Image: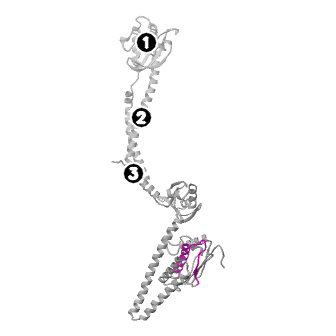
Amino acid sequence: MKLKLATKIEVLALIIVAFSVLFSGFFLAYKVAGELKKELGKRALAIGRTVAENSTVKKYLGKPEGFKKIEPIAERIRQVTNVDYIVVLDMKKIRYSSPLPEKVGTKFFGGDEELAFADNEYISEAKGIKGVAVRAFVPVKNEDFTDQIGVVVVGILLPTWWELLKSVRGGIYLATIWGLLIGLIGASLLAKKIKNEILGLEPEEIASLMEQRNALLNTINEGIIAIDRLGTITLINPAAQKILVEKNITEIISESRLLEVIKTGKPIYNREIFVEEKQLISTSLPLKVKGEVIGAFTVFREKSEVQKLAEELTGVKKFVEALRVQNHENLNRLHSIAGLIQLGRVEEALDLIFCLTDAQQALTTFLTKNIKDPALAGLILGKVARASELKVELKVSRRSFVEAYPVKLDSTKIIEIAGNILENSLEAAALSDGKKVFFKIQATQNHLKLLVLDTGPGLMIEHEKIFEPGFSTKGENRGYGLYIVKKHLYEAGGKVRIRSTAKRTAFLVEVRGEKNDD
């Protein structure tokens, strides 16, 4: 069974605290042992000096039967000072006192006593007859302090590590209990804080989300670049690296206005930007956590790809719309003809059939003969049907013709220009009493002129405002049609003029080619 993150943190904290307390205990014992050794050495040295200065010791040291006088004195001092042993030696290393009575009168072999017989006072650590001890060696001088007559050795046994730990075990136990308790509380609080910061997810859940995120970023075709509040890049997906070269990454951050998005907290949609020779469409959005902007990201794609998709979608939509309108109109006409026949007015029914057929055929023949662009001719037929649906009369000038287009325009752009202006005029005319729209187009390789006139209520705002992206008086998700018109004309070096009154609005589009055609 997998442990939860909170449990892992708590267990780890307890282990760390336990090891810390144990390590502290051993370290404390080590330090205590060192300090204890120094203090015991100083104490042994002081006691050794006291014995060496004793007049009885000086008088009888080196004399036969001298141990009978020296032994009681050394033993009494040992008992009073609570040391482990006091050994008095003459210059031949013969013991005059010892903690073991049988050793009195025998020769001393310690291994660390030679310097003392050369009139040196010092402290050493060695293993004696009772164990490892701190030993102080003090020379004994005669009454005149002219000659050395012996050495006093004072030994204090050192406690073992276990004895030292036993002496501080109460403190270690108490520190361990408090440490574990505080560690457990701290670990619980830390685990709770971490869980809150990672949205309550477990590490394996975060890993799974990261794998999904990386798979998503590696799969999508749009480039994505994200930055933090300081403008540092925090994410760039493979598609972005493919579209851009390394030196252009900072340029797109500037062009897509990511820092502005961070500052304002407002998104910027469908912005056209140029990076080197590439034309991109970008959308920049703020990154928010609990209502606070922590960064921003931009999603971009080459305009050529977007335009290709848009053209495909536009073609399908136009085809579907044309079929829908045509079907609606045909149903209305069939109902009218059926009604006349039921009323027995056969002649009128025949006249209506011929009239409708002739009008449709006449327009189709005219467009086929004069409009050399089949896509534009299809658009005009579709708009005529759309006008009929809106109860608007759309009149196509018989002076219209299309031979070719100026170099910087193509069929797709012309359809978008004419289609968007016509749609706006039809919707405006449908709101008026006149309900009429006039359409005229004349195009050669050197010159294009397009005129759309409607009887709508006119424009009540500044004319330039209607060309801003996203501006519309018709609700949400509108307002890009006339923006596209202006963009195409700007790229082609053309212009659009608007004349509007309370009862009429005219759109005049002109684009000149490389040569003027007067």
Give the residue drawn at x 49%, y 88%. Answer: 358
Question: In which image quadrant can residue 128 be found?
Answer: top left
First along the sequence among labels 1 and 2: 2
Q: Distance between the residues labelled 1 and 2?
A: 42 Å
Question: In which image quadrant can residue 246 be found?
Answer: bottom right
102 magenta-colored? no
Instruction: Find disc 3 in the rendering and name its residue.
Output: 204
Front residue of 173/269: it is 269
Instruction: Find disc 2 in the rendering and name its residue.
Output: 23
Foreground mark, 1 or 3, reads: 3
Left/right of residue 101 with respect to residue 498 in the rendered view: left
Indicate which disc residue 88 carries: 1
Reply above or below: 410 against 79: below
Give coordinates of residue 254: x percent, y percent.
58, 59
Tell whether label 3 touches label 1 (CB within 8 Å): no
Give coordinates of residue 293: x percent, y percent.
51, 58
**What residue span does the magenta drawing correspond to?**
399-428
First along the sequence among labels 1 and 3: 1
SS type, badge 2 = helix
Indicate the amino acid at tag 1: Val
Give coordinates of residue 52: x percent, y percent.
46, 13
Indicate the amino acid at tag 3: Glu
Q: Main secondary structure of the magenta part?
A: helix
Tell whether label 3 touches label 2 (CB within 8 Å): no
SS type, badge 1 = strand
Front residue of 255/129: it is 255
Foreground mark, 2 or 3, reads: 3
Give the residue drawn at x 39%, y 25%. Answer: 160
Reply above or below: 269 against 191: below
Q: How would you rate the neighbour count of disc 3 (Cα within 10 Å): few for under 14, some for 14-19, many for 20 or more?
A: few
Q: How far apart are marks 1 and 3 (CA)?
A: 76 Å
Q: Distance between the residues labelled 2 and 3?
A: 34 Å
